Amino acid sequence: MLLGEQDRTRWDRALIQEGQAILRWCLRRNQPGPHQLQAAINAVHADAGTIEETDWSQIVALYDRLLAVAPTPVVALNRAIAIGEVRGPAAPLALVDELDLDTYHPFHASRADLLGRLGRHSEAAAAYQRAATMAPTDAERDFLRLGGRASR
């Protein structure tokens, strides 16, 4: 289920609060590693009542830090997606197109979503189809073949 479609009232607030307390304890050491930064990103999502209330600028800043300590293409992809929530789809598409993730279906799905948001529908459809051929489950393949979140 897409993050924006989740019913956040069903999230376990007690577990979220426990996780955030552990995260604050870890961050007080002022030596955040990749796991603490990933937890901080999740905490920002958990703090928002809705997807629209998410502090995407804070998430981009956390991904900047994560990319500095864990410079992987997947981290760069997730950072680009967050940038897209702040600046629109053009800037992250340029970043995504530089990544070497051709065998990673979320790369193609993300690229397809950005292309669709830019009105480049035939390119988006091709990218969704590429993602669908690599998706590991029937539900993901069906979702991608129908055009991802644009089909909702």
Image (cartoon, helix red, strand yellow):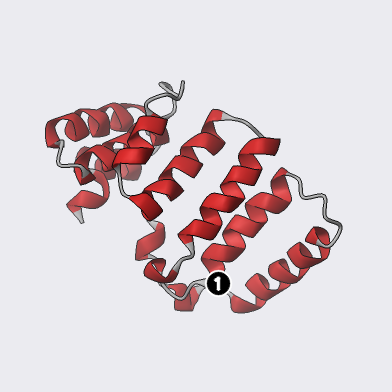
Nearest the eye: 46 or 139: 46
| Residue 147 vertical position relative to residue 27 in the rendered view, above or below | above
Q: Secondary structure at mark 1?
A: helix
Name the residue: 37% across, 68% down: 52
Compared with 102, 122 (above or below) is: below
Q: Quadrant of the N terminus?
A: bottom left
Q: Quadrant of residue 141?
A: top left
Q: Disc 1 designates what residue?
A: 47
**Is residue 25 left or right of 19 when viewed as pictured?**
right
**Residue 100 image position (x, y, % from top left):** 46, 20
In this view of the protein, can residue 1 be seen by the observer?
no
Name the image quarter holding the C terminus: bottom left
Residue 39 position within the rendered picture, expressed as x and y whole percent measured from the top left: 66, 56
Viewer-nearest residue: 117 or 15: 117
Q: Residue at x 64, y 43 (%)?
A: 66
**Residue 103 rendering spot, x and y as whole percentages:** 43, 22
Q: Which quadrant would residue 102 be assigned to in this image? A: top left
Please name the amino acid that badge 1 sits on.
Asp
Given the current orientation, which residue lies at the most extreme right position?
29
Q: Is residue 91 visible?
A: yes
- Callout 1: few (<14), some (14-19), or many (20+) C-alpha neighbours within 10 Å? some
